[in-house]
Amino acid sequence: MSGCGAEKGLISIDEALALIQTKVKALAVEMLPLAKGLHRYLAKAVYSDVNLPSFSQSAVDGYAINSSLENLQDTVFDVVGEIKAGSGLNHQLADGQAMRIFTGGKIPERTTHVARQEIVVVESDSQIRLVEQLKPQADIRFTGEEVQAGQQLAEIGQKVNIGALAALSMAGVQALEVFREPKVAVVITGDEVAETAEDLHAGKVFDANGPLLKAWLQDYGIDVDILHIADEAEQVTQCFERLKQHYDVIITTGGVSVGDYDFVRPCAFETGFEQIFWKVKQKPGKPLFFAEYTAQHHHCYLLGLPGNPAAVYVCMQIYGKALLDALQNQRQSLAWFSGLLTHDLKSDARERFLRMHAYFEQGQLKLQSLAKQQSHMLSNLMQANCLVRIPANIKLEVGQEVSGVFIHN
């Protein structure tokens, strides 16, 4: 194991991430209708053209009143009308008058308070009485109190999530300038994929990598094309030659090590890709390969993942996300958290990403390692909610602090 970790030419996790974040060129910018902007990264800041609220309105169902009195308890007001939400009429109240108003209704001019209906007694069709005291300007949403016209709503680089989309929609934003969505092809290499249970008897295995990557990329917000090809140099070369002109990213699984049937790297070179790095001092995922093809203004990046599914999953969470983010001009570091181990951990010659379960106990984030951490095993992903980064060549004890990233998919 020490020999594996001491292999020459390996780069660190931080070096690999830095190369992705600095070498990758951002994609072009496009204009999209707001409704199609979910999961996209903004290429231009967004400013509001309107005030929010755009007019002063009632925060409750009740009565808008005008009173010059300081103490309103037991005061009687004359009801002179009704205002529904969406009514565009302009009303004005005289001292001692009230209007029935509903949540979101436009506040009449000269309104001093809004009395919620729970503190109002209806004396007759035309009169009400307040049974509690009210503070001035109670339950009024004032023009521009949330957002003022010209105010920045979203900044360059911000990801449009559901909340952002709703907030921008409320402000009347119709379109967004965003970075183009990466076009991604996934190439599953190998002759060992089983189609049926009977195939297992022939030494084949069910494919986890294809469904894993398809689902991961869909969760990220990208539709992806999945291809399966045999471990044959000619097929791999033809595949790369075809894909490099039409995609921004090619993700492969398997074929990146030094075996007799590992054709991804030599075939990448044959089709014009230039290596950015190969082999990272980490576990799982050591033979990770990253390369770039450039032709005029087009760039295609090849992320060669190992074949073992746990290594595929870990590398996508760390490096796949960094690559797709960088293509959309997002180059910030991962959001590492700190937590405390609940058990001892043996040392290893390579830095490790362990699948763990994080939970809070008495205000502290605790980290429980899970069994079956080998790179060909996935069953512990049923319980894992984070990847924890374990330093190399250090034995860790219960209670020690380590860093990790939460996984949400």
Image (tube, helix red, strand yellow):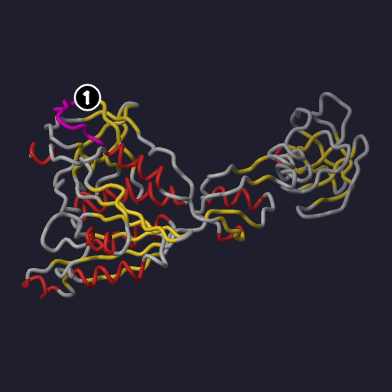
Looking at the image, which residue is at 48% across and 47% down? Answer: 329
Looking at the image, which residue is at 76% across and 29% down? Answer: 134
| Residue, disc 1 | 399
The kind of residue tagged 1 is: Gly
Q: Nearer the viewer, residue 370 or 136?
A: 370
Q: Position of residue 167 (x, y in %)?
A: 61, 48
Q: Nearer the viewer, residue 397 or 97?
A: 397
Quadrant occupied by the N terminus = top left
Number of other residues with Cα within 10 Å of mark 1, as a class: few under 14, some 14 to 19, many 20 or more: some
Q: Kindly indicate the quadrant of the structure image that contains residue 255.
A: bottom left
Q: Kindly indicate the quadrant of the structure image that contains residue 192.
A: bottom left
Look at the picture and state if 283 lies above or below 360.
below
Looking at the image, which residue is at 16% across and 50% down? Answer: 375
Would residue 381 appear left or right of 376 to someone viewing this image? right
Looking at the image, which residue is at 83% across and 51% down? Answer: 82
Q: Position of residue 337 (x, y in %)?
A: 35, 33
Would residue 27 appear left or right of 129 to someone viewing this image? left
Look at the picture and state if 406 lies above or below 86.
above
Would residue 17 appear left or right of 189 to someone viewing this image? right
Q: Which structural element holds mark 1?
A: loop
Tally of marks: 1
Q: Position of residue 63 (x, y in %)?
A: 79, 42
Query: In this picture, which residue range is highlighted in magenta?
Result: 389-398
Would residue 293 appear left or right of 164 to someone viewing this image? left
* 249 falls in the magenta region: no
Main structural element of the magenta stretch: helix, strand or loop? Answer: loop
